[in-house]
Image (cartoon, rainbow, N blue to C red):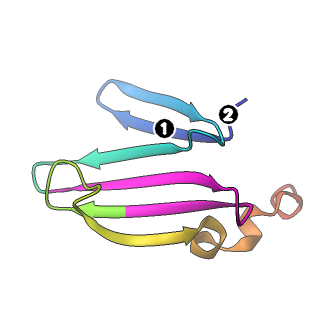
Amino acid sequence: MSEFYATIKGNRGAKTCGGSKDSGISATAQSWFGSVQVELFWNQYKEKVYSRITAGPDSTAYPSGKQVYFGPLEDLIGPNILDKSKREQ
C-alpha cells in the first residue's frame, strides 16, 4: 500500500500513481504559459509529511521555478484534516 497518491485527470480520463515514504511523490501540471509542481515526501528527521510547491514560467517548474511553499503539510492544510479520528466522525 502506498504512502502517497497522485491523481491527474485530462481528456483521456484519470490516472493514479503511488509513492512510498522512501520515494515520495511529485506531480507537475503545465501549460504553454508556465507550470506548477507539487511534491510530498516523508521528512524522517521531523517525522512528518512535508510538501514543496513550486511555480515557474517554463514547462518545468522545478528547480528553476519560484518556491511557493515548503514545510509540513499540516501547516499548509491544517492539523484537523490530517487527524484520522476527526475525519471519520
Residue 7 - label: 1
* Residue 49 in the image, given as x and y percentages of width and height: 65, 58
Q: Amino acid at mark 2?
A: Ser
Q: Residue furthest front?
A: 45
Q: Look at the numbered disc 1 and give the secondary structure of its residue.
A: strand
* Residue 26 in the image, given as x and y percentages of width and height: 45, 45
Q: Residue at the spot x=44%, y=72% of the render?
A: 69
Q: Residue furthest top?
A: 12
83 sits left or right of 40 in the view: right
Q: Which residues are magenta?
A: 34-53
Taking the magenta stretch, the answer to whether it contains residue 6 is no
Q: Residue at the spot x=86%, y=55% of the render?
A: 88
Q: Quadrant of residue 21?
A: top right
Near-viewer residue (80 or 75): 75
According to the picture, the residue beneath numbered tag 2 turns out to be 2
Q: Residues within 10 Å of mark 1 (few under 14, many from 20)?
A: few
Tell me: residue 1, above or below residue 55.
above
Taking the magenta stretch, the answer to whether it contains residue 35 is yes
Q: Residue at the spot x=57%, y=72% of the render?
A: 76
Residue 42 - label: none
Q: Quadrant of residue 34?
A: bottom left
- Residue at mark 2 to residue at mark 1: CA–CA distance: 13 Å
Q: Amino acid at mark 1?
A: Thr
Q: Residue at the spot x=56%, y=44% of the render?
A: 24
Tell me: residue 1, above or below residue 61.
above
- The secondary structure that dominates the magenta segment is strand
23 sits left or right of 8 in the view: right
* Residue 73 in the image, given as x and y percentages of width and height: 61, 65
Q: Look at the numbered disc 2 and give the secondary structure of its residue.
A: loop
Q: Quadrant of residue 58?
A: bottom left
80 sits left or right of 38 in the view: right
